[in-house]
Image (spheres, rainbow, N blue to C red):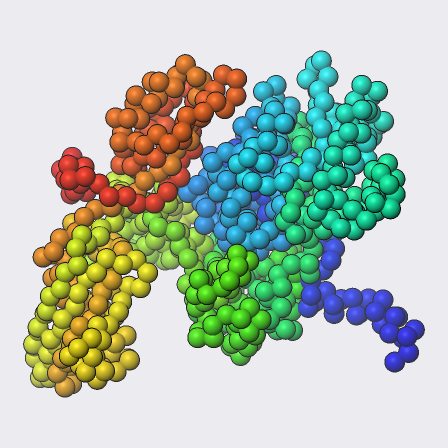
């Protein structure tokens, strides 16, 4: 082939389309928008849609007319529950933006969305800086190795402090912030932004709702500061980026370094997660949002610049389900991030859980509006209709052999062990390989990894005739939100829901009422205690029965040990070795399943038994005994040991961060000490406020936010998130058991 022909082929639209189909569009950005609750994600997203021309009017959270908070519950409550995807064009690029919930009860949603994006915008409240949930979402984004940029919002407020936010990024998130802007306010408090790289002043026009802005030379008074900030920026970047350092050396100073070279160096440093560009503005007052959109294109990576992990699929299609939503007309819609290959209408897809089904229709996302399309190229986001079994978190591909081949190739590239998809995290040598191993485990996981429930409650349909409808509704809700647990309690005969918090459970109830029109009744919210054994204990169990004329018999000896890594083991010492060597692997699987099922419900309050290993010592199974009989015998043996040896309760602990005026601190601490709280830290937060960091048992925090409001006359703010389970003393344990049994 001649050079001219090769070049013209490269330039041809056809070839470009083929390239995009497999490797992802370079003029595309998939980004997540993350923040602590109320920092202004939804307001910022609304502005982006408005400036991009996707909406004609600007939605406001307080008016309940935003595009991304489209569920009734979200509009009523003014919070984001479901992360939703919106697509818009900006500067000749398509941006897919996933708005995610800020409330801690919906952390799982954030986690799923992060699988689907290539970079994130973290929004800070300019008056609060880095807050508890900012730290959580930041570390989630770090786990996914996502490049980030920060938007310091609410800079219109008189108490906003840009420098404090930047210092928070440095201190609390251990990152290297690169300030691209400086805020300036006039005597009326109007915000102007000074751009550090271009050395310009940008003034937004309020009359056009911020659609227009003027770019002016900076005032004489700001020139020196601005120049100094540009030098600092170049200095910091050339310490990281060799190409820029070379330019600085060659031109013997900072004056000659062009804006383009700075931007290119910054883009490289962001992609390597060495720095985080920081921008500022006020979404509510329509200042600065277009610059954030510019920065998404200028500094965050295109799909083809990330996701090398998915290269192992070669030219096969691979995508990930990051969300399922329910649409009245179209039924369940599955939101898929396409990593490689092309997703076409009518394609058959298989999941890591070995299910297979066909995509009936494909749509382009715009929150609650959908445009039908016939195919989606690699790198993009699509909405599929017709998938009935996929759940949030599923990995989708075109054939089972594509999946197997990809696993093998990936294990080879990462030099990970070949036995199955499960990768031992400690087998890797450095931090990045560790992260790779964790990600590979998550990507190929057959079940989504679900955080522990902290609350549970029973759920009852209004009548027997609506039982099936309620079960179908719960099944659908669980497909959308795997952090909702639905169990059937065989002892009480009730359906039991487990969730991440009071708000989570409340939202589930409201959604069943409004979306499925079933008047369900939720029992009182109970704390999800766990149980654990105190000492190792061992026992034997024999059972013999005649079922349908066939004799069934099992004699089994099991031991329970304190161990949190492996839930099941074999005692192959001494005489037991000969016995266990005769047990077939299939039968071992049956015994393991039965024994572990008994750990789901401890003897004290029915809590899950954790940090406990079941060890099989000996088993004799009569000829012709059914598997289900063996499984039941193993479960009964574990139950017998648990009941005889007894268990201790473990209670959920919450981490609280309270910001309050200094004069209220002693009253808050006095109240907290009556709640079995451990005060970790009290430090100044601003001139008038202090921050208290405490850990306290969830059982002591019922209605705490209204108590705090009363103690502080509404001047304090608080965040709370689960931070593990802890032992309790005997008195507290007795009270917990009484409460769980309804005696308190
Ligand atoms: N003064 C001021 N208020 C703002 C600004 N941006 C947002 N707000 C207000 O802050 C509140 C929270 O804004 P949202 O956009 O809902 O914040 P969010 O981060 O999406 O909140 P969740 O979805 O609940 O996590 C609303 O009352 C907004 O009107 C801003 O730039 N300045």
Q: Give the mark count.
A: 0
Residue 361 vs 650, above or below: the answer is below
Give the residue at x 55% y 54%: 144
- The N terminus, quarter of image: bottom right
Give the residue at x 57% y 25%: 127
Residue 8 vs 255, above or below: the answer is below
Left or right: residue 677 versus residue 196 is left
Left or right: residue 216 versus residue 430 is right
- The C terminus, quarter of image: top left
Give the residue at x 25% y 62%: 613
Where in the figure is residue 239, as x and y percent of width and height? 72, 44
Left or right: residue 630 versus residue 227 is left
Residue 562 vs 743, above or below: the answer is below
Residue 25: name its quadrant. bottom right
Residue in front for this viewpoint, 294 or 546: 294
Where in the figure is residue 70, as x and y percent of width and height? 54, 43
Where in the figure is residue 30, as x and y percent of width and height? 64, 52
Residue ranking furthest to the bottom: 623
Tell me if residue 65 can be seen: no
Left or right: residue 655 versus residue 268 is left
Tell me if residue 386 can be seen: yes
Where in the figure is residue 597, as x and y percent of width and height? 24, 63
Residue in front for this viewpoint, 225 or 288: 225
Give the residue at x 17% y 81%: 579
């Amino acid at each position: 082939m001649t050079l001219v022909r090769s070049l013209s082929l490269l330039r041809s639209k056809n070839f470009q389309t083929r390239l995009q189909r497999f490797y992802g569009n370079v003029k595309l950005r998939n980004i997540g928008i993350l923040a602590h609750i109320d920092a202004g994600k939804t307001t910022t997203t609304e502005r982006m849609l408005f400036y991009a021309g996707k909406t004609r009017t600007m939605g406001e959270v307080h008016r309940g007319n935003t595009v991304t908070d489209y569920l009734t519950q979200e509009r009523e409550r003014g919070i984001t529950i479901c992360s939703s995807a919106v697509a818009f064009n900006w500067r000749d690029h398509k941006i897919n933006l996933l708005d995610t919930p800020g409330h801690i009860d919906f952390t799982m949603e954030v986690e799923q969305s992060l699988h689907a994006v290539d970079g994130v915008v973290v929004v800070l409240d300019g008056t609060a800086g880095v807050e508890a949930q900012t730290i959580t979402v930041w570390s989630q984004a770090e786990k996914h190795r996502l490049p980030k940029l920060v938007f310091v919002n609410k800079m219109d407020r008189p108490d906003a402090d840009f420098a404090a936010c930047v210092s928070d990024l440095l201190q609390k998130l251990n990152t290297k912030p690169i300030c691209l802007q400086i805020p300036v306010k006039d005597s009326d408090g109007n915000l102007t932004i000074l751009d550090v790289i271009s050395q310009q002043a940008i003034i937004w026009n309020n009359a056009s709702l911020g659609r227009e802005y003027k770019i002016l030379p900076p005032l004489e008074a700001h020139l020196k500061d601005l120049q100094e900030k540009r030098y600092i920026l170049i200095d910091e970047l050339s310490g990281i980026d060799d190409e820029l350092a070379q330019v600085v050396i060659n031109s013997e100073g900072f004056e000659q370094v062009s804006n383009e070279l700075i931007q290119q160096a910054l883009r490289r440093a962001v992609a390597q997660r060495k720095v985080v560009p920081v921008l500022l503005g006020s979404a509510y007052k329509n200042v600065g949002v277009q610059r954030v959109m510019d920065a998404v294109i200028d500094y965050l990576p295109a799909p083809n610049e990330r996701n090398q992990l998915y290269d192992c699929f070669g030219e096969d299609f691979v995508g990930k389900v990051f969300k399922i939503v329910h649409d009245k007309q179209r039924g369940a819609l599955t939101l898929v991030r396409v990593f490689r290959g092309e997703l076409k209408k009518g394609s058959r897809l298989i999941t890591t859980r070995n299910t297979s089904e066909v995509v009936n229709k494909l749509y382009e996302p715009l929150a609650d509006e959908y445009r039908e399309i016939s195919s989606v190229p690699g790198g993009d986001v699509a909405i599929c209709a017709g998938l009935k079994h996929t759940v949030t978190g599923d990995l989708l591909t075109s054939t089972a052999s594509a999946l197997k081949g990809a696993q093998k190739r990936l294990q080879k590239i990462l030099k990970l062990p070949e036995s199955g998809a499960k990768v031992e995290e400690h087998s890797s040598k450095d931090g990045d390989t560790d992260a790779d191993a964790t990600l590979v485990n998550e990507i190929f996981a057959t079940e989504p990894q679900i955080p522990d429930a902290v609350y549970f409650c029973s759920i009852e349909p209004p009548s027997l005739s609506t039982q099936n409808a309620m079960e179908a509704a719960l099944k659908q809700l669980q497909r959308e939100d795997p952090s909702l647990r639905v169990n059937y309690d065989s002892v009480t005969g009730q359906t039991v829901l487990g969730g991440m918090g009071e708000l989570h459970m409340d939202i589930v109830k409201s959604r069943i009422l409004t979306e499925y029109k079933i008047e369900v009744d939720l029992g009182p919210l109970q704390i999800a205690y766990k149980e654990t054994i105190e000492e190792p204990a061992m026992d034997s169990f024999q059972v013999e029965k005649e079922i349908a004329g066939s004799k069934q018999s099992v004699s089994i000896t099991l031991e329970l040990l304190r161990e949190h890594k492996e839930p099941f083991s074999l005692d192959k010492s001494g005489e037991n070795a000969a016995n266990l060597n005769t047990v077939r692997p299939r039968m071992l699987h049956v015994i393991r399943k039965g024994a572990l099922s008994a750990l789901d419900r401890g003897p004290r309050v029915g809590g899950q038994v954790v940090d406990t290993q079941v060890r099989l010592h000996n088993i004799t199974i009569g000829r012709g005994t059914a598997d289900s009989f063996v499984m039941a015998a193993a479960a009964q043996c574990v139950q017998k040991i648990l009941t005889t040896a007894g268990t201790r309760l473990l209670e959920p602990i919450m981490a609280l961060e309270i910001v309050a005026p200094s004069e209220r601190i002693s009253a808050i601490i006095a109240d907290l000490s009556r709640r079995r709280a451990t005060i970790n830290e009290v430090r100044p937060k601003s001139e008038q406020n202090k921050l208290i960091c405490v850990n306290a048992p969830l059982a002591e925090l019922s209605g705490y936010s209204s108590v705090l409001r009363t103690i502080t006359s509404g001047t304090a703010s608080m965040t709370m998130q689960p931070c593990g389970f802890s032992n309790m003393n005997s008195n507290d344990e007795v009270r917990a058991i009484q409460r769980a049994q309804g005696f308190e």
